[in-house]
Image (cartoon, helix red, strand yellow):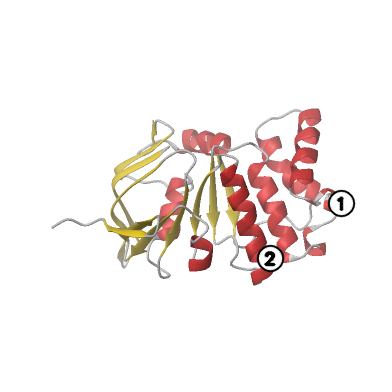
Amino acid sequence: MITIKNLHKTFVTETVKTKALNDISLHISEGEFVSIMGPSGCGKSTLLNIIGLLDDVREGSYHLLGNEIVNMKEAKRAQLRKQNIGFIFQNFNLIDELSVYDNIELPLIYNNIKAQERKKRIQQIAEKLNIMHRLQHYPQQLSGGQQQRVAVARALITNPKLILADEPTGNLDSTNGNEVMELLTQLHANGATILMVTHSSNDAAFSQKTIIMKDGEILSEKNNQKTVNVFTE
């Protein structure tokens, strides 16, 4: 599903040039659940944004679902993102002025799904995530765990091929955090491909593979309790 080779990303301002990613190579197969860990500023969120087609890249190669993303125009990236990727954010990113129903409905509207089909899908996902009784409430009326469930519903409503989760339990207590991780585990068991950025080794343990990053580079990949050094002499 995802193949990245020798990817570089540099941010340039008037006074400084910062190397955010340095020669990144990785492969994620369809149906995998992969975590990315590392200290703040190591490049993991930059990598997630590039994989999620939220940021462009000019050096290296990135294939998503058979499409070369490097140097792809923004309009085509946006279309590919809209049709194939669901996002779950640490801060939920719900719109306070909209009801739970309306928040979940937004991606369907962006994808030009007809009203009757939108209603059917929202009811199905709300039942699946146990938030049917919250559809007419507003985000500020919900607990943190409930808000994250709404965010997960919004991410899944278009049946995306790839789910990207950026610190999905970062603003939750341990009980709600474990609930969200169990939900992601269930989604993975049902066939979802998930890539998650996290600071939590507990959360990373739910995934099949953990990628460790530092200073814009991949240091190692931990798979099935075995750590593999990605560097060669």
The numbered disc on residue 56 is none
Q: Camera-side residue: 225 or 77?
A: 225
- Which amino acid type corresponds to the residue marked 1 in the rendered image? His
The residue to which callout 1 is attached is: 133
Q: Is residue 89 visible?
A: yes
Residue furthest out toward the front: 225
**Mark 1–mark 2 contact, CB under 8 Å?**
no
Residue visible at 42% across and 56% down in the picture: 46
The residue to which callout 2 is attached is: 176
Q: Quadrant of residue 125?
A: top right
Is 161 located above or below residue 222 in the figure?
above
Rendering coords of residue 228 (x, y %) = 29, 57
Rendering coords of residue 120 (x, y %) = 79, 33
Is 159 located above or below residue 91 in the figure?
above
Residue visible at 61% across and 46% down in the picture: 187
Rendering coords of residue 216 (x, y %) = 32, 61
Q: What secondary structure is marked by label 2?
A: helix
Q: What secondary structure is marked by label 1?
A: helix
Instruction: From the viewer's perspective, tell me whether residue 138 is left or right of residue 84.
Output: right
Instruction: From the viewer's perspective, tell me whether residue 142 is left or right of residue 13.
Output: right
Residue visible at 41% across and 46% down in the picture: 56
